[in-house]
Amino acid sequence: MKTRLLLTAAFAAPLTLTAANNQLLGWNNLGMHCMDSDYSVFSVLPPYNTVEAQLLVGGRLVTNGTGYTVTYQAVADPDGSFNSTARGKGNFYDFVLPLYGAAVSPESGLTPWPMPGTNNTPQPMLFEPTNRPAPGVATKVNWFRAEGIPITPYDDAGRKNPYPLMRLIARNGSGTPIASNDVVLPVSDEMDCRACHASGTQAAAQPFAGWVWSSNPERDFRLNILRLHDDYEFADDPELYAAALAARGFSPEGLYRGVVADGKPVLCAVCHASEALGTASFDSIQPLTAAMHGFHARVRDPDLHIQLDSSDHRGACYRCHPGSATKCLRGAMGSAIAADGSMEMQCQSCHGGMSAVGSLNRVGWFMEPNCQSCHTGTATSNNGRIRYTSCFETNGSVRVATNQTFATQADIPAPGISLYRFSAGHGGLQCSACHGSTHAEFPAAHRNDNLRNLALQGHAGMMIECTACHVSMAVNATMAVGGPHGLHPVGQAWANQHGDLIEGGLSRTACRACHGLNDRGTELSRAQANRVITTPENKYGTKNYWRGRTVSCYDCHDGANSSDPSTHPPAVAQSVSTNTTSGARVAMTLRATGNGSITYRIVTQPAHGSVGLSNGVATYFPDPGHVGTDQFAFTAWNGWVDSNLATGSVAVAQGPFSVSAVAHVPFSWPAGWPAPFAGVATPSNSTAAVTYDWDFGDNSPHVASQNASHVFAAPGLYHWRLVARAASAAATVSGVIVVGDAVQLDIARSTGGLTVSWPQVGVDVVLERSAALGTAAQWSRCTNTVLAGPGAWQVIAPNAAGTEFYRLRQVR
């Protein structure tokens, strides 16, 4: 038996692969940027998106930006969604000055990097050899950066799209374009607290003085939060709170009163330290991440009925973070599916529970998980597995890898911190340049995230094609271990020459790091693209490597020490099909013929559901409401090689569906003022749009909005009704609202001053005064103390020298 290795061929010189001369690799720094959907009450984060990119010229990383420019401009995605301007997209610019102290015009943000504008003017990025993410911290990067782009999740046609695209274009000193790519600027305004803090929702979250009942749903839950915040802070530490209010220029009556009476919105980070905004806490007040996560860790989710500190459900995080619609955890890890069809990894798999995130010993945005806590090494050197699905050991401690092959850089960007988003590796490239943004690691679940690599290398997934960046790639002993993480070149050239390299002295140990001790392949040796490999003189035939196939030595020859054809032919997997109805799981027994003990693996998940796999039975779980044909791919493993790629097809018909609804309506309200009516409908097993129909019970026209307000002209007992419909399903909610007399001021004059009083009703109001009426009126808040009298509120004001007018303004 010959011992010569497979795929031998005589070459006078190493085979060289050729490619374009230049490449530009761009990415978003975080994978998701949150912003507020309303800025009139308080702000957690502004619209602030950051793009980074590294330029390669002649296959080498540019480490001096002189002579090169990189710009960004809007580009349409495959659906035609185009986002070039910040104009007319929310109320950030109405409140940016009182919140952030910056007078900026639409298109501009809080930094020098604006939106391209309706003319889509290319905007320049800044080259940075070193980045300074925090005071006293500097880290080498060699990237072009645009920080703080004020993009919103609404395109220029008003459609919501949290994954808009920008085109990055690199030019040389002559202004000639030399490279470009399209990157996602992920942004969401889905930070949402209304499930607990909207008026009429959770009793435990009701402010001491009652719900605000604003008819503006965006302001309503925010006002309730500020009102409750004042309640707690004045009760827990009144001296500290009073000092903070004074130091930051807020009303001594509290944040809520400052908003509703003075129109001054609140930036949370002026009192609570925020690493995102670079602010420090006032005195001993907790950082924002500790205050938010630490407090809410003990809260129970109103719908999931789990404690938010739960470590096994991303819904605990998605309750407030961009999840239910945006689904920001969309990268390769976040999209992994468990045997039962559920998500294999949760947010907590990396970050820990909410109490851990809210620890006072943690610095937000910097003390984050690192790659090696899960990716512990190679096939021959690891912590018991090549990869885990949690950063944590069974005792709760963070796993420490025994092998640093896939590790982030130590002490980057600062001593004691090891962050993926600042780490670099192969040739000085940032990890994100090849693997994508945090939360959106390649391949991502969202199409737009994958467009960059589809254009750069012809397929999704991490950057793996050497010639996507390098001008040429020789296949030799140096290059055999010279790629990122010790990777060799991939494709036909490597297949042709690797046998000669082994015979020439290349150690099999390097091969086995990925292909395993038994040379049969591991998850580290799977093909990342569809490839057709031919063999010299057709000795081993033509090999079709589909994306995800495990590359085994036994695909071609009989092990690493033989050039004879393999005696372990692959099994033949048989495609399967079945049908079900939406909302109903269905099991399929997978089948394959061949020798050996056969096991199965799901290679690609369906587009409209998930597939769990256990003991050769694949269970398909359709997405709620999905109707149509869905498909997944699987392979059969006989212990030596993968089979062909087979498919599972499921025809999904419409199953039973329904809709449920709740309404939040105050029990009593005065006549003459707008009363709020809020509805929340939840379709079950349906993707149909929900419509609303409000009947206020006073013979007035019905209203078709989800959130409505209605003025009752006269006192009385009114029976209201809400009908929510999704396709042919309907839900009805009804109730009673007691409408009392219209609120009127009563003014009594005495030598001691004016007594202004009004009835105590369940509506918060602001007493205002002016020296004139009509166009000359200048209404200002009456700051005199409000006293509680028998069934009425009253204010005693000094007698004015001239005429004064008073009015009540409803808080809305």
Image: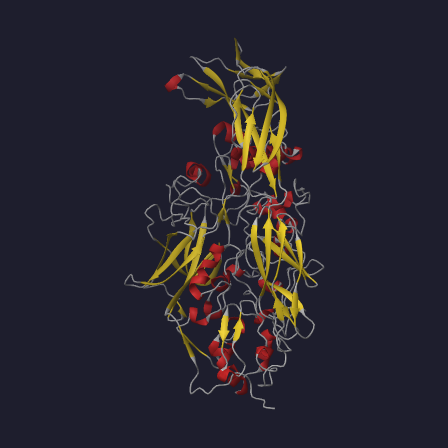
Query: Number of callouts in the render?
Result: 0
Most foreground residue, 544 or 744: 544
- Image coords of residue 805 (percent x, y): 45, 15
Name the outermost residue toward the bottom.
Answer: 1
In the visual, does 427 lie left or right of 762? left
Most foreground residue, 802 or 435: 435
- Image coords of residue 33 (percent x, y): 49, 49
- Image coords of residue 740 (percent x, y): 59, 16
Q: Is residue 696 visible?
A: yes
In the visual, does 467 lie left or right of 637? left
Name the outermost residue toward the right.
Answer: 395
**Considering only vertical position in the picture, is 326 above or below 437?**
above
**Considering only vertical position in the picture, is 139 above or below 101?**
below
**Considering only vertical position in the picture, is 676 above or below 162?**
above
Name the outermost residue toward the left.
Answer: 174
Most foreground residue, 509 or 284: 509
Residue at 65%, 58% in the rendered image: 612
- Image coords of residue 497 (percent x, y): 49, 82
Q: Quadrant of residue 454?
A: bottom left
